[in-house]
Image (tube, coloured by chain):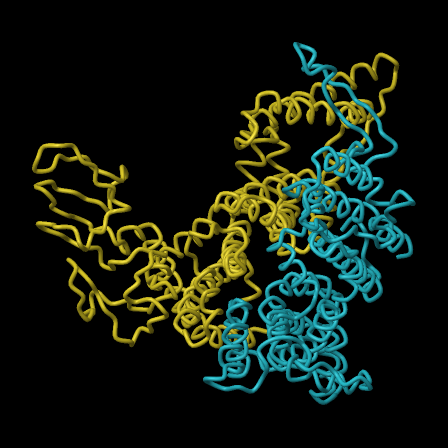
Chain colours: A yellow, B cyan
Amino acid sequence: MVKENNNERIGVFPKQLAKRKTFRLAKYFIVLISFTAIFAGWICNEKPLYVKYNGLNLFPALSLKGYTEYSDDKGSPKRLIYSSVNWRDLQKEKVIWCPVIFSPGKSDWSNAQYKSPFDLQTYSENGAETVADYKKRHWLGTTKTGADVFSGIIHGARTSLTIGIFSMAIAGLLGIFLGAMAGFFGDHKVVVSKSGLYSSILLGLPLSYFYGIYIQRFDMAMPGEPISFSALQLILASACSIYGTYVAGKYSGQLINFKKTSFLQIDQLISRGIEIFNSIPRIVLVITLSALSRPSIYNLILIIGFTSWTEIARLVRAEMLKVRTSEFILSAEASGIKTVRQIFLHALPNVAIPAITAITLGVASAILIESSLSFLGIGVPADVVTWGSLLNEGRQNFSAWWLVVFPGIAIFTTVTSINILGDAFSESIDVTKR
Amino acid sequence: MRSYLLRRILFFIPTLLVISLASFVILINSPGDPVERMMQAGGTGELIPSSLLKNQRAEIRHRLGLDLPVFYFDIHSVNDEGLAKYIPAISFHLTNQFHRWLFGDGINSKGIVRGDFGSSYLSQQPVSGLISDRIGWSLFFTLTSIIFAYLISVPLGIKAAANKNSAFDKSSSTILFILYSLPAFWVATLLLMTFANPDVLHIFPASGVKPVAGYPADANFFQRLYLSIPHLILPTICYTYSSLTFLSRLMRNAMFEILDSDFIRTARAKGLNEEKVLWKHALKNSLFPVITVFAHVFPAIIGGSVIIESIFTIPGMGNAIYQSITTQDYPVVVAVFTITGLLTAIGYLVSDILYAWVDPRISFSK
C-alpha cells in the first residue's frame, strides 16, 4: 500500500507541474481578455485619444459627453459630435490615435468586399488615398462592408464577458440560495403548522400575485412605453402576504383546535423543481425566450441567468448535505447559534469552492450560448458586433476565412481558459481526482 | 423498487403540466396579434370594407377562442376605479384558452393532447403536419450520434483508464478537453469551409440531406440512405463530438473507480488475464453511470440541433424553430418547444428507470 502511494506521488508530480503551467497560461489569458474587454473602447476606436482642433484640447475616445461646443472663425457657435464627425478628414493640429484606428461595425468603403489580412489595403486621410502601412491596416481583414475584424473581436470580448459574468452573477445568487436552502434544511428540519401551510398556499400565493404583480399594472406608464416592473414590490408583497396568511392560518387553526404540524420538505420541493426545469432543453428555452423579447444585451443576461442556475443549485445542495451533518455544524447548533448565522458563517464558506467552480464553468457555457445566439442572429441587437455575429458573416462567404478563423479562435481560447480555471478549482476540492 | 418506479412515473405528470404551462405562457405572450397575422397571410390584397373587416376579425377571434378567458381562474381587482382596485377578487372559468389549447373545443381544434398545435401563420397549414415531416430527421441525427458517441467513447475511456497516466491517457484527455471547448457552430462552419468549399476541397455537399434531384421514385429505404450518406457525414460529426467528449471523460472516471474495487483485485488475484478483467468484469459495472447519463446527453443534442441543423440546412425540428423565429411564426416555435420538452422529459424518465434497473438500491428521495 505504501509503495503504491509512493509510485502515485512520483507519477503525479510532473503532471501537476504541466497542469500548473496550463493553469498559469489560462490565468494570464483571462487577465488579458478582461483587460481588453474593459479598455476595448480605448484600444480600438476610430475616435482619436487626443486631438487638438481649433485650439481646443479634446479627448474624444475617453469622453463620456460625446460632443463639444466651440465657436468658429466668425464667432458663431458650433457643435462637434464625436460619433458622426469624420476624424480622418478633419483639419486637426495635433492628433494621437488609438492603437487600432477602427471602430467595430463601422463600414470602411475603401476596404469593402472582404479584404484579407494579406491583401493590399488602402487608407484615406485628409482626402488623400494611400496604400495603408502596418499601423493603418486592418490586421485581421474586413467584412463585406469593410468593417474591421480585429476591432470587432476586441469589442466582442466586452459583450461576451459582460453577458457571461453578469448572467452567472444572477444564476449564482439564485443557485446558491436555492441549493443552500435545499441542502441545509433538507426534508425534516422545518416544522410548520398544517393549517398555516394550507392557508399560505391557498390564500397567500394568490394575494402575493395580486399585490406583487397585478396591482402594478395600475402604476404602469402610458401604453407603448416599456413596462417598469418593480421586483422589490413583488418580493415585499409576496413575503408579507405569504407570511401573513401563514400566521393567520396557524392561529385560526389553533382556535378550532386543529394543531397538526408537518415537515416542510424544502429539499424535495427544490430538487423536483430543478428536475422539472431541466427537462426543458436549455438552448431551446433560451432561443425561444430571446426570440420573444426585444433583442438587447440586458434581456439576454436576464434570460441566460434565469435559465442556468440549476447546475449550481445542484452542486451547492450536494455539498451542503455533506456539510450539514458535519461536527462543526452540529456543535454550532448545540451551542445555540441562530440558523441564519449557521448558514452564512459556518455552512456557506464550506460550499464556496464548489459554487465558484460551477459558476466559472457556467461563465464559459454562457459565453458559448451568447455566441451561438448571435451566430444565429437572435437575441443580440443587430448593431452590436460580437464573435458570433462575425462568424455569421463568415458563413455568407467561405472564401473570407479570416471571418471564421479569428472569432472562432477568440471564442475557443476564452472558453478553454475558463474551463481550465474551473477544472483547476474542481480538482482542488476533489483530492481523488489528482 | 416497484414503489420507486411508480413514484417516478407519477412524477411525470407535474413535469408535463409545467412544460405545457410554460409553452402556453410563451404562446400567449408572443408579440403581435395572431388575428392580424392570420389575416395578413390569408389576405388577397383586395380592399375589404372596414365594417366587414371588423366582423371578420371578430369571427376569427371567436373561432380561435381568443375571446375566452386565459386560464381556469383569474385574480383581479373588484373594481378598476378608486380604492376598490386594491381589493382582490377571484373568478373561475370552465371554458378558457388553456383548456381549449390542451384539449380542443371539438369543432375547430383538437388540442395538443391529440397532436393539434394550431396552424402556422405563414402557410396556414397545420403545425402538426409540418412537425411530423421534420421530426424524423432530428430523431435520426440524435439517435445516430448517440450511438456513435457510445461506440467510440466507451473503448476510449476504458483504454485511457486501463493505462492511467500513460501517453495515450494524457494525449486523449488533452484532445478531448480541447474538443470539449470547441463551439459546435465553429466546427461546423470550419468543416463546411474546408470540405464543402469549391475553392478548397469539394468532397461533401454543403447543404440539405438528399441529392438535389431527389431520390429515384423506386428507391427503398437503404438505397435512399446510401444516396444521402455524403450529406450526412459532416452533420453527424458535429452532432457526435461534443457528447463524445463528455461520455469518454465520464467512462474514464467510472472505470478508474471500478478498477480500484475489491472484486477486480480478486479477479486479478485468481489469475484472470487483464483483457478478461477489463472487458468482462470491469466494463459491466462501469457502464452503469455512462448509460444513465443518456438523459443528459439527449437534451444537449436536441438543443445543439438548432444550430447544427440551421448551418447544414437539415429539414429537422431545430431548423424549424430557427426559421419560424426569424419569420415570427410563433405557433411553430411553441410546438417545437413543447415537443422537445416532452422528448427530454421522456429521456429523463427512461434513464431513471434504467438506473433503477441496474442499481435497485435507489430511492426516490435521493
User: Is residue A426 rendered to the left or right of residue B97?
Assistant: left
User: Is residue A308 rendered to the left or right of residue B104?
Assistant: left
- Res A87 seen here: yes
Q: Nearer the viewer, residue B353 or B209?
A: B209
Q: Locate residue A293: give its quadrant.
A: top right
- Res A416 seen here: no
Q: Nearer the viewer, residue A329 or A83?
A: A83
Residue A387, position in %: x, y?
Answer: 44, 61
Q: Locate residue B127: give its quadrant.
A: bottom right
Residue B108, position in %: x, y?
Answer: 87, 46
- What residue sits 29% from the left and 76% below the top? A119
Q: Which corner quadrant holds the N terminus of chain A? A: bottom right
Q: From what the image shows, is residue A85 above or below residue B285?
A: above
Residue A179, position in %: x, y?
Answer: 63, 44
Residue A243, position in %: x, y?
Answer: 69, 22
- What residue sits 73% from the left and 34% below the top? B54
Extreme residue in the top direction: B83
- What residue sits 72% from the left and 42% below the top? B35
- Report the label total: 0
Q: From what the image shows, is residue A351 above or below residue A412?
A: above
Q: From what the image shows, is residue A327 above or below residue A364?
A: above
User: Is residue B44 rendered to the left or right of residue B106?
Assistant: left
